[in-house]
Image (cartoon, rainbow, N blue to C red):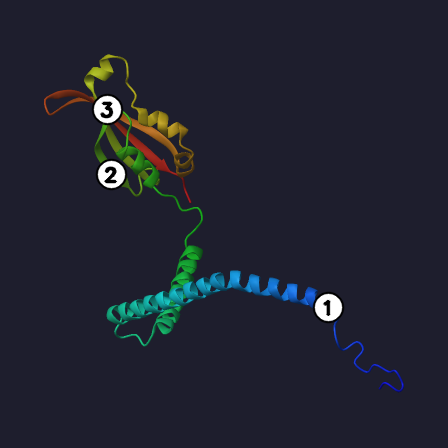
Amino acid sequence: MSMGEINLAKGLIWSAKERRIIYRWMLVYLLVALILLPVVAYRASVNVHDGIRCGRQVQVIQKRFRQQHPDQSGMLAYADTLRDTLQQNAEQVAAISRAIPHTTHSMLPLLEMLLYQRDSSFINRLAFVQEDKDKRTALEFSLVLPANRVRSGEKFPALLQDWRNDPMLIRQFTAIVPVVTERGNILNKDVLIMKYRGILKEQ
């Protein structure tokens, strides 16, 4: 090598400056690794703990399922059975909904209003009339008002005002018709008995 003055190791050995730079980067890498190691170890322990806890919960759920449904082969099979049952029920409900006319009316809104009146009147009589003399379906009821209210000028119960302001009742009934008003005595108290008929709209 000395005869031709050729240095075959040139470029294979780093200079002192390059070695110092690489050494410093290695120290930085080791420092970062030492800092992150506890964090990674903590996260791993948390994941392991969560996995163990989830496994115990699954065992508890499976044990409870076997106790409550001993005739079932497994939770997945039971879930499939429930899904099929719900689908069948949904189809039956849809079939019933298609069979019922959209114009069907209900007396439930009026009954709810009669039961939850906002004044001192109360129901004395309630009767469903499938077909009156004019071949109409109706709901007959009597409201009792204290006589002192009548003497004070309050002759009409709040029901009539609520009726005119309730859009659902307007859709269900054509009118609320007064039949007769008479005086009476209930529990030794003078009262005014007002009879009405709520006429349902025709389908």
Q: Nearer the viewer, mark 1 or mark 2?
A: 1
User: Could you tell me which secondary element the residue under label 3 belongs to?
Assistant: loop
Q: CA distance from mark 1 to mark 2?
A: 110 Å
Q: Could you say which quadrant of the image residue 112 lies in?
A: top left
For residue 89, above or below residue 121? below
42 or 4, nearer to the observer = 4
Residue 59 location (% of width, % of height): 31, 70
- Which of disc 3 and disc 1 is earlier in sequence? 1
Q: From the image, which quarter does the N terminus lie in?
A: bottom right
Kind of residue indicated by mark 3: Ser
In the drawing, what numbered circle is on residue 120?
A: 3
Q: CA distance from mark 1 to mark 3?
A: 105 Å
From the image, tell me which residue sits under label 2.
127
> Is the residue 135 above or below the residue 12 in the image?
above
> In front here: 109 or 15?
15
Q: Quadrant of the C terminus?
A: top left
- Residue drawn where x is 43% and y is 34% of the image: 167
Q: In the image, which is nearer the foreground, mark 1 or mark 3?
A: 1
At a point 39% along the width and 39% down the height, the residue shown is 172
Q: Which mark is residue 16?
A: 1
Q: Residue furthest left?
A: 188
- Locate residue 15, reporting x and y percent: 75, 70
Q: Secondary structure at mark 1?
A: helix
Which numbered disc, 1 or 2, marks the residue that appears first in the sequence? 1
Q: Mark 1, residues whose alpha carbon is within 10 Å: few (<14), some, or many (≥20)?
A: few
Number of callouts in the render?
A: 3
Residue 184 in the image: x percent, y percent? 16, 22
